[in-house]
Amino acid sequence: MIDTDAIASVTRDLSRKDFSHQFGMSKVAPREKAIWREIRDLGTRLWLDTGDLEEAKTLWCSDFEALTTNNTLLNKEVQKGIYDDLISEIGDAIREVAPKIVERMLVLEVAFVLNAYHALKLAS
């Protein structure tokens, strides 16, 4: 039998690894860009849709309402190799608490952690 509570604990901890956001306190100084302000003034709600952390840092401004991403955009980041060590760490940690986990479930858990971890990095 697989200890799902142990897996949940490991995935929660790894998802929040290196995450120390101060809620309500942005790490990015507020800034506006005239072009986006003009578009917002027309009634458009602006969302930045990216998985690229550097691109998000460059493009983000206070005219955007939100930042969103998806699995395809995350996959582009994974393909860069930036998460290779984390993927191994996640797999090893889950196998440690659930040595009999089937590969399909392990892949889903790793994907869950990657999505949560990446989303928190984007949000911070």
Image: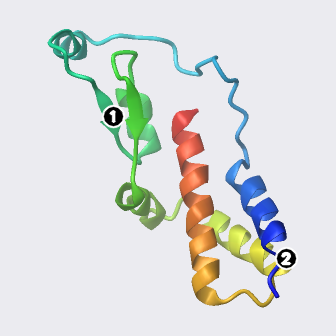
Residue 44 versus residue 111 in the image, above or below: above
Q: Quadrant of residue 2?
A: bottom right
Residue 94 appears left or right of 63: right
Q: Secondary structure at mark 2?
A: helix
Residue 66 versus residue 36 in the image, above or below: below
Picture coordinates of residue 8 (x, y %)? 76, 63
| Three-letter amino acid code at the position of disc 1 | Leu
Picture coordinates of residue 33 (x, y %)? 28, 13
Residue at image position (50%, 65%) is 81
**Residue bearing the label numbered 1:** 48
Residue at image position (55%, 50%) is 118
Label 1 crowd bin: few (<14), some (14–19), many (20+), radius 10 Å: some
Label 2 crowd bin: few (<14), some (14–19), many (20+), radius 10 Å: some
Q: Quadrant of residue 114?
A: bottom right
Residue 107 appears left or right of 31: right
Residue at the limit of the structure toward the left, as seen here: 42
Q: Quadrant of residue 124?
A: top right
